[in-house]
Image (tube, rainbow, N blue to C red):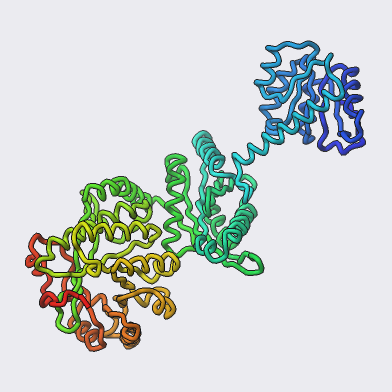
Amino acid sequence: MNLINEKIDPQSPLLIVDDNPVDRELFRQLLISCPEDEQALLGVASCEEALRILEKHNVRCCLVDYRLPEQSGLDFLKEVRRQESGKNMPVVIMTGEGDENTAVEIMRNGAQDYLVKCNITAEKLKHSLSSAIQTCDLQNQLRYLAHYDTLTGLLNRSLFLDRLQTAVDKCDRYQQSCSLLYIDVDNFKHINDNYGHHAGDIILKAIGDRIRDNCRMTDSAARLGGDEFAVLLDRIDEDNTNHTAEKLLVAASKPVTVDGQKVQISLSIGVAHYPKIARDATELLKQADEAMYRAKQSGKANYFRFSEKYKNEWERRKQLEIILPNAIKTNQLSLVYQPIVSAKDQSLEALEVLVRWNPPGFEVQASELVEMIEHLDLFDSFHVWLVNTVLKQGAQWQAISGDMKFCLNIPANHSHSDWLVHCLHKGFETYNIKPFQIALEITETTLMNDLDLSTQLLTALQCEGVEVAIDDFGTGYSSMAYLTTLPLNWLKIDQQFVRGMEDDLRSRKVVEGITALGHSLGLRVVAEGIETESQYVMAKNIGCDLLQGYYFGRPGFAAERWSEFVDKFPGVSSISSVGFIE
């Protein structure tokens, strides 16, 4: 090896590979002819020496003779491209004679340029090397953009999925195991809405840094998109996987300072394992995603491990999610109706509409059905089916039932609120149902998840003539502020307080307080969960306007004739003569 120029730090040199010392000196003279282009230069006579240099130095560019004693410059180029350190390094090949076929072959194998020695001048050589370096730098930048997330510096989804498949293949080949952490930032939309997208970017970058700092060098951390991250843990057992998840939760719990304000953040993490539970890379990713969803359901700032026990439930859920869209489309869902009666005389004033689905071979709870509608983003098709089915049934009964009111529950995600209002408006015209015959129920938690969207929805419903009820009042974010500003009509007291009235003085006081509050604001108050005569009497004496619960009747399917339907509810004395019209 001959160190041609040691004046510049040789840690990132330009490497000349040529077995002819005269040619090496010629190229050195050409390259140092302009002081502003001064570059650390290393010169070697063989490919073997050059490969050793590449192992020790971050070579800026290689200038290689095509004809070398033990192998050609083309062979050297192929060898360099196989090595990690040489994959993205600029290479310029020189030859003593011009040959078009040789030039094409050289460029096809990854050289940045091809020079004929007899035509080389200082200007041509420097231009070729400069162009090769710039081309490689640009290619590296494009490669980075294609494989890495520019905000956090973590892998992007595309490269991560490649790494995931490679890890699974390696597990199969060497009987190893790996784990996957699927990570989501809790309440990130709230952060963006309250602090701005600039703050959101700062927080995402901080989370990316914390994930990187709490993982091993051998782990692959990625930002999959939005506020979702993932970490692939190679060759790790379940205990250490859980420990990593716990470390990330602790690290993320520290506030992030944004423009002088401290913003509290937390993560929900899903954990899945291969090959113990998942059968391939795709399933591993889905299981980790599902586990993350369960972590959010269990209270956020937590992790959930996808276990063998949970796998059976997940397989069942997958089957249901496959058939649910078609079930909605083909009218396989059904409705049941529970009476809401007047506290004065138990006359029927409204019906709460509840959705049921009983696919062959499955038992599906109502709460699970709602979860799947949310998870699969089936709100639009579900709203169309629900609104049309309810209004059609109301139209069939209207001649006898009068202007009976129907209460419908709004799913937790009401970002599709414009579509819901559109469906109602169209349905009122189609079935000749009056808007005041529909009341939409929304929980406090849903209301406060996105107060701006909630306000838009409730205002649009008010303009349409639809009434609004706050469901499960007292269990969420009870606030005098929204009660006084939003267009509301009913308060439905959560059943846990109503059922506790008989034995718990505090529960009774809560019911009394909510009733007084509702009346002071001009709202009608509904007591949910009435199951005994004693509860009925107490709610009536407290002053609740309307009552609902098994004491008056369990939810029942519609009957063709109204009289047959009403007979299902022995606790209902009659149909209200006013039909809830005020």
Q: Position of residue 500 (x, y in %)?
A: 29, 81
The quadrant in which residue 252 appears is bottom right
Question: In the rendered image of this protein, does residue 538 appear above or below residue 88?
Answer: below
| Residue depicted at 56% across the width and 47% down the height | 233
Q: Is residue 424 left or right of residue 51?
A: left
Residue 571 in view of the camera: no
Q: Position of residue 527 (x, y in %)?
A: 26, 78
The quadrant in which residue 499 appears is bottom left
Q: Is residue 290 left or right of residue 509?
A: right
Residue 514 in view of the camera: yes
The quadrant the C terminus occupies is bottom left
The quadrant the N terminus occupies is top right
Nearer the observer, 131 or 304:
131
| Residue depicted at 51% across the width and 54% down the height | 183
| Residue depicted at 42% across the width and 58% down the height | 294
Q: Position of residue 572 (x, y in %)?
A: 13, 75
Nearer the observer, 501 or 392:
392
Question: In the rendered image of this protein, does residue 550 appear above or below residue 227?
Answer: below
Q: Is residue 275 left or right of residue 404?
A: right
Nearer the observer, 57 or 225:
225
Q: Position of residue 7 (x, y in %)?
A: 92, 36
